């Protein structure tokens, strides 16, 4: 039998030791008396070779070879080979949550280093050891805001990812929370700051924004933060970590809590997961954080070591009064992130940001030469931007697939009024030649309507 | 030796990566006021520095691939290596999740959608549920999804009942998940045999009962013979039954939880379906539902069309909505699918029974050396108590630390909360009799050592990278990130 070590002789000896005649008697004594189903619809098992051949065949049916300009929060960055080499270490990937710290110093130290790197990137004091993804991380931050202020109104900027908006709406449904979403103008890719401000009052628990926003716009949140702080509203920023290679961090801008999606830090796109949610805050809010946190301490001989800490926040102790229900998080994805950030390094990270920003500018300039292509009210951006096309964006993207390009995301899927708007992301992987070929193909599609 | 952090290795200006060249004009489109004043203080190390640092860190871990790891309730079974190869295939690993949301984009991801759809078909057969969502990103996330569907069902009937019954032996995630779904938690007592106290259940069932969250088998590793009766009574009171599948490995191939009366259940793919635990995730908590809750499943769902193609389906008006950004932790679903088709029917039939034989073998062999609080045939794990060694000044934690010096990862300790000095041992079906014999002997040796020299047990571990750590100091004066100045 696959993956079962014991032979029939082993089983016989063991059943004899247990003191039962056979397996049926053991089930009976265990209280399981129902008949065993025959699982008639289950196919017969396959050999390792057959399984790999079948699944490799399915993998070949997927289009992983399009030249990609698709992002919207999930980016095709290059991952150095070191990352999978480290996450593929048996001692890391076949261990579990470090409940026994003496036997888990490798995982614990790596998580402490991950937390440290996240704090440095965001300019925050404290990070946890990971959450599921950027959307659940934003929800957890909102709950921190609600608990901290004991207010029930949460404000979400209309320029936060619609995927996260739908997740937060779903999670808020059963809670005593008034979720308010600010309007965004269809003629702008920037946040309507005035409209957002009018939603903030002294009954508001928290305000959630995205940086850069879902349309890629880079915005100065300083004013909004000051306005919110006057009303003792918790300010929450969902951010794109690679953009922070160049951009002023959420901590320096003055946000109380920063969250986001860490897929871009060394994790494969993998059709939607596993990904990496991160969350960080100031020491002031430390004890309201959800999830696992690793701390540095000493052992009985005075040597440095690492442990899970501040556990009185957590579900296994506090049960229904815990800061969150999270238990298993995304440890291996966090390990990928710290390995990635170590490899890319201080200097490389800045260079990475400059490459993404420059290639995005170049792509936008090339596309804007095409007759009829225009902008959509966007003041500043990092590596993702919106263009308004002279025809329906969904149709353009569909035709571009035939030419070998994933041309971007047609915003009409989530914003029906933005029929002709295309969201385009550019990473360091796109070469000048690819970008030029992209522009040529786009021109062909747009002029042959 | 004090461990050196990655931030304290290398020196200014050192690089560990190469990047594509700047082949376009070096411009950017951001205002200078929003630029970062200083680069983030990340490590400055060579590629070799990174590799050596993390390879050496990995050697400070115990793991399934280095040691027997009988961590109760976690199902630390062997993780087949072919699964890692499959998940790394570029056609899966590099696939952008937004592709199928483009017009005609479904054609670009037929292989991935087939995995999701066909795995669901197999799970329906294995577990006896009507439908599944692959979206939940971990076990507790699956619990939350499940109880949110229960909340949605009551709301759809304009019923305001809001009390969730949860046995006192349950995992802490159960009450925590119920709270986020808006329920009030009411605890149920455990009877002297380790089952749900039926009198207590009856006294707490009323027209405010929204449902029950029942772990099956329960967290004592025991199969509650009343499980179908409990489900019937909760249903009769107007509630729904949530099955916590954390312990599903015990009955995999032996029973179908859908046949027992559960309306909804999450499975931990990282436990029962052997996706790697990853040092604390990623997990996957796919959820199965009966007919009653099927309309409330999260969107999207995957459908198979008349022409044999697969597509995403967003059109369910009663759906609770978006639980995850996309279609779940696909990389793990893929591994679990590979596992399931490898097992096939015959392999499936042998999982639960071998897990149960292994656990009962350990229970039988340890019976003379430990207290067994509920002394009856267990399922996939056994819970023993170390109370009998308290008179030597030795506790469950000390026995765990002594096991580390013998090369074993300890069992789960101090859980469930209702058993004092609990050691919860789950061997799984992938371990051999010799491995179990070695572990049993190590525990017996430790009990002998406790009687002769308890002090030596209190000093353990001596052979790990560190001695016992000061957790009180860690919580009192938290040091959670490396200070920034080098």
Image (cartoon, rainbow, N blue to C red):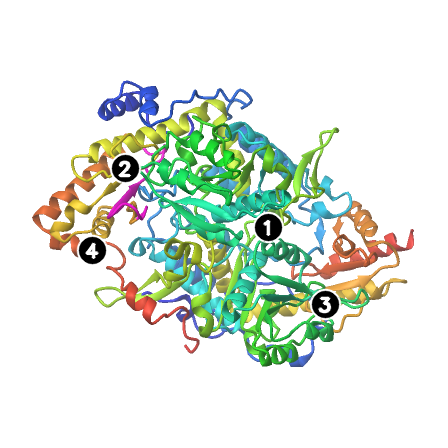
Q: Which residue is mark 1?
A: B324
Q: Which residue is mark 3?
A: B24
Earlier-in-chain disc, 4 versus 3: 3
Earlier-in-chain disc, 3 versus 1: 3
Which residue is pictured at 24% across the width and 59% down the height?
Answer: B468
Of badges 3 and 1, nearer the viewer stands 1
Of badges 4 and 1, nearer the viewer stands 1
Check contact, mark 3 vs mark 2: CB within 8 A. Answer: no
Q: In the rendered structure, the residue with mark 2 lies on which chain?
A: B
Element under disc 2: loop
Q: Quadrant of the C terminus of chain B?
A: bottom left
Q: Is residue A395 left or right of residue B327?
A: right
Q: Position of residue A181 (x, y in %)?
A: 69, 64
The region drawn magenta spans: B415-432
Element under disc 3: loop
Of badges 2 and 1, nearer the viewer stands 2
Q: Nearer the viewer, residue B381 or B87?
A: B381
Check contact, mark 3 vs mark 1: CB within 8 A. Answer: no
Q: Are marks 3 and 2 on the same chain?
A: yes
Q: Which residue is mark 2?
A: B192
Quadrant housing residue A212: bottom right
């Amino acid at each position: 039998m696959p993956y079962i070590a014991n032979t029939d002789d082993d089983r016989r000896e063991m059943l004899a030791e247990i003191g039962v005649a056979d397996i049926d008697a053991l089930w009976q004594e265990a209280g399981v008396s129902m008949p065993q189903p025959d699982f008639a619809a289950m196919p017969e098992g396959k050999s390792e070779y057959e399984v790999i051949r079948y699944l490799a065949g399915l993998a070949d049916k997927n289009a992983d070879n399009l030249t990609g300009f698709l992002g919207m929060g999930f980016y095709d960055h290059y991952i150095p080979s070191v990352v999978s080499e480290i996450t593929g270490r048996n001692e890391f990937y076949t261990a579990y949550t470090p409940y026994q710290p003496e036997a888990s110093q490798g995982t614990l130290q790596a998580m402490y280093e991950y937390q440290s790197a996240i704090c440095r990137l965001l300019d925050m004091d404290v990070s946890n050891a990971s959450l599921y993804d950027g959307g659940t991380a934003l929800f957890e931050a909102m709950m921190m805001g609600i608990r901290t202020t004991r207010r029930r109104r949460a404000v979400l900027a209309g320029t936060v990812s619609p995927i996260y908006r739908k997740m937060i709406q779903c999670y808020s449904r059963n809670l005593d929370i008034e979720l308010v979403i600010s309007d965004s103008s269809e003629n702008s890719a920037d946040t309507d700051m005035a409209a957002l401000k009018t939603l903030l009052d002294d009954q508001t628990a928290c305000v959630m924004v995205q940086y850069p926003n879902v349309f890629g716009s880079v915005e100065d949140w300083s004013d909004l933060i000051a306005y919110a702080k006057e009303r003792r509203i918790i300010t929450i920023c969902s951010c794109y970590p690679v953009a922070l290679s160049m951009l002023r961090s959420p901590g320096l801008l003055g946000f109380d809590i920063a969250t986001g999606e860490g897929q871009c830090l060394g994790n494969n796109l993998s059709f939607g997961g596993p990904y990496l949610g991160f969350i960080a805050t100031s020491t002031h809010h430390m004890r309201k954080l959800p999830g696992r946190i690793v701390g540095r301490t000493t052992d009985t001989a005075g040597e440095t070591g690492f442990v899970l800490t501040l556990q009185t926040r957590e579900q296994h102790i506090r049960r229904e009064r815990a800061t969150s229900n999270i238990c298993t998080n995304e440890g291996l994805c966090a390990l990928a992130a710290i390995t990635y950030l170590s490899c890319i390094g201080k200097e490389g990270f800045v260079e990475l940001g400059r490459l993404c920003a420059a290639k995005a500018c170049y792509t936008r300039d090339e596309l804007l030469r095409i007759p009829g292509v225009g902008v959509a009210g966007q003041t500043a951006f990092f590596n993702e931007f919106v263009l308004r096309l002279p025809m329906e964006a969904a149709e353009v993207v569909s035709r571009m697939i035939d030419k070998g390009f994933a041309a971007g995301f047609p915003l009409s899927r989530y914003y029906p009024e933005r029929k002709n708007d295309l969201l385009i992301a550019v990473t360091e992987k796109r070469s000048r030649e690819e970008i030029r070929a992209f522009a040529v193909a786009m021109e062909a599609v747009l002029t042959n309507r | 030796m004090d461990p050196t952090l990655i931030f304290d290795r290398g020196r200014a200006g050192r690089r560990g990566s190469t990047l594509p060249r700047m082949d376009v004009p070096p411009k950017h489109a951001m205002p200078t006021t929003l630029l970062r004043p200083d680069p983030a203080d990340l490590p400055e190390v060579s590629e070799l520095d990174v590799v050596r640092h993390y390879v050496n860190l990995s050697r400070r871990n115990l793991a399934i691939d280095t040691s027997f790891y009988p961590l109760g309730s976690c199902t630390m079974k062997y993780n087949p290596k072919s699964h890692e190869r499959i998940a790394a295939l570029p056609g899966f690993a590099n696939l952008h999740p937004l592709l199928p949301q483009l017009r005609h984009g479904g054609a670009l991801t037929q292989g991935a959608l087939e995995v999701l759809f066909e795995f669901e078909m197999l799970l329906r057969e294995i577990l006896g549920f009507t439908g599944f969502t692959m979206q939940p990103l971990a076990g507790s996330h699956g619990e939350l999804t499940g109880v949110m569907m229960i909340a949605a069902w009551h709301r759809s009937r304009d019923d305001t009942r809001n009390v969730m019954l949860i046995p006192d032996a349950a995992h802490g995630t159960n009450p925590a998940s119920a709270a986020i779904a808006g329920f009030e938690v009411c605890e149920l007592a455990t009877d002297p045999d380790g089952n749900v106290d039926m009198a207590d259940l009856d006294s707490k069932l009323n027209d405010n009962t929204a449902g029950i969250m029942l772990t099956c088998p329960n967290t004592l590793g025991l199969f509650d013979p009343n499980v179908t009766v409990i489900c019937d009574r909760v249903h009769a009171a107007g509630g729904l039954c949530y099955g916590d599948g954390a312990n599903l490995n015990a009955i995999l191939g032996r029973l179908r939880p859908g046949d027992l009366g559960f309306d909804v259940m999450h499975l931990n793919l990282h436990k029962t379906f052997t996706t790697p635990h990853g040092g604390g995730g990623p997990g996957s908590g796919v959820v199965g539902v009966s007919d009653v809750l099927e309309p409330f499943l999260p969107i999207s769902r995957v459908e198979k069309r008349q022409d044999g193609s697969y597509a995403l389906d967003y059109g369910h008006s009663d759906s609770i909505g978006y639980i995850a950004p996309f279609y779940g932790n696909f990389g793990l679903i893929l591994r679990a699918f590979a596992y399931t088709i490898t097992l096939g029917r015959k392999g499936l039939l042998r999982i639960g029974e071998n897990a149960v034989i292994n656990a009962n073998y350990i229970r039988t062999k340890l019976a003379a050396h430990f207290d067994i609080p509920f002394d009856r045939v267990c399922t996939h794990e056994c819970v023993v108590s170390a109370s009998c060694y308290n008179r030597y000044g030795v506790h469950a934690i000390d026995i765990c630390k002594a096991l580390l010096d013998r090369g074993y990862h300890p069992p789960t300790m101090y859980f469930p909360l209702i058993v004092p000095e609990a050691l919860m041992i789950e061997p799984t079906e992938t371990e051999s009799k010799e491995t179990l014999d070695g572990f049993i002997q190590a525990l017996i040796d430790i009990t002998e050592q406790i009687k002769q020299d308890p002090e030596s047990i209190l000093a353990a571990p001596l052979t790990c990278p560190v001695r016992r750590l000061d957790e009180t100091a860690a919580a009192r004066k938290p040091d959670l990130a490396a200070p920034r100045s080098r």
